[in-house]
Amino acid sequence: MEGKFRLFQNNTIVILGAGIIGCTTARLLLEKGFKVTLVAKHVPGDDDIWYASNWAGAIWHAGDSKNDKHRYMRAVSFRRFMNDYQSDKECGVCLVNVKEYFEKAPESMADLLGRKINPNFRSMSRDQFEKSGFEYGCQYDTLVIEPPRYLRFMKKKIEELGGLFIKKEIFSVDEIYDMFPDSTVFVNASGIGPKYIKGLEDSKCYPNRGQNVLVITDTSTAFLRSGEEYTYIIPRPLQGVVVCGGVNQGDVDSSNIDMSIAKDEIRRAHKLAPEAISESPDVAGYVVGIRPAREGGFRLEKEAFEDDKFILHAYGFNGSGYALSYGAAHYISIMVEELERRFCVS
Ligand SMILES: Cc1cc2nc3c(=O)[nH]c(=O)nc-3n(C[C@H](O)[C@H](O)[C@H](O)COP(=O)(O)OP(=O)(O)OC[C@H]3O[C@@H](n4cnc5c(N)ncnc54)[C@H](O)[C@@H]3O)c2cc1C
């Protein structure tokens, strides 16, 4: 091996960010034999509200995307989370039944991605949803992820595969280039980071605050409601609680619990699923997290910043970072392999 190619293969790929996007990317690249170092202010085990991955529900949901690439990204994530669920029942992934209600019926039933991916997908009979004013309802099985547990599992996996974590906040992108002068590929998986990091400064990024109530109950069914009264109830079977939520507060970043939101989330959860959530349920706690949102949607693309040096962007996943994570990692790993080929033949 000579010159640039040898450099490419010997030097670590640097990932800025150790949320679900940085961790899934690290895992896939390590599995393909690349060297990987993650640099991040927050790493698995941390519980800052700005570390979105620690606070997600998190449910794998098909979403309403008609974009083929986005659909495939969700499908890849489902496959990988299913593999983890099947091989390690303690990793933080569980399989649950879902009842989903739509205020407006989907435009095309054939387009529903869940039909193709979620096991046991079936439409409800009209009498099961019409009386509550819904236009459509369906039932299926899906995967839910308990974030702190799954992030710890990922850290262990990454370290077993030879990946390194460096806990550090950076203020300018040049800092990270200077830390690794021989590296040619950098991945920007810094969530909301590009809004603030000098040299990245993406003005389309904005914080989207979420707040959830953790309710003690033994239900293992998830309930989802789309539309004006967007509401979710997501079980965490390994913890014996459900996550009740459904609030998006754009450009709000307070860490304080807003009790009026909490009360309203309980009210909506009870209305959606009185069989699972009582009017005054036992509350185990509250959760606040900042979703890394971006006007126009997430960014997943390659940018050259110097001769033969590249930064691969994967950020702005807002409320679907878990559902899209392994799909994003899949596309980043393809970009890395294309660069490897280019270094090898040029
Ligand atoms: C309440 C709530 C519920 C949610 N529910 C779901 C759900 O059900 N399903 C779903 O798919 N998604 C859900 N999400 C969304 C999901 O949590 C996010 O989309 C996902 O976590 C984003 O991952 P990320 O790795 O891009 O960002 P993050 O998890 O925020 O990670 C960013 C990383 O970059 C690092 N970083 C940033 N800036 C710097 C810097 N200057 N220097 C060094 N490091 C830096 C951080 O420290 C961190 O390691 C939910 C989110 C919230 C808040």
Image: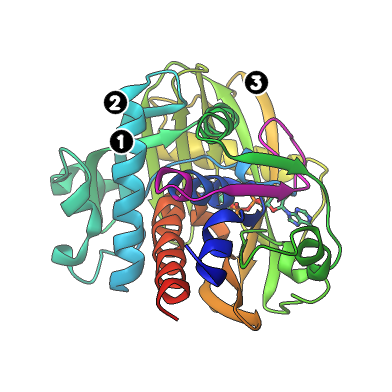
Percent across and percent down for residue 180 are 74, 59
- Residue where numbered disc 3 is placed: 284
Q: Dot 3: within a 10 Å radius of its alpha carbon, few (fewer than 14), some, or many (20 or more) residues?
A: some
Asked if disc 2 and disc 1 are in contact, CB closer than 8 Å, the reply is: yes
Q: Is residue 246 magenta?
A: no
Q: Residue at x 60, y 30 (%)?
A: 148
SS at badge 2 = helix
Residue at left offset 76%, top offset 66%: 177
Q: Is residue 66 visible?
A: no
So how many labels did they put on this image?
3
- Quick check: marks 3 and 1 in contact, CB under 8 Å? no
Between marks 3 and 2 in the image, the one whose residue lies nearer the viewer:
2
Residue 254 on image: x %, y %: 82, 51
Q: Amino acid at mark 2?
A: Gln
Question: What's the residue type where badge 1 is placed?
Answer: Met
Query: Where is 31 relative to 335, above or below?
Result: above
Tell me how far mark 3 sits from mark 2, CA to CA.
29 Å
Nearest to the observer: residue 343 or residue 90: 343
Q: Position of residue 297 (x, y in %)?
A: 52, 73
Disc 2 designates what residue? 86
Looking at the image, is mark 3 or mark 1 earlier in the sequence? 1
Chain-order first, disc 3 or disc 2 = 2
Question: 59 and 77: which one is in front?
Answer: 77
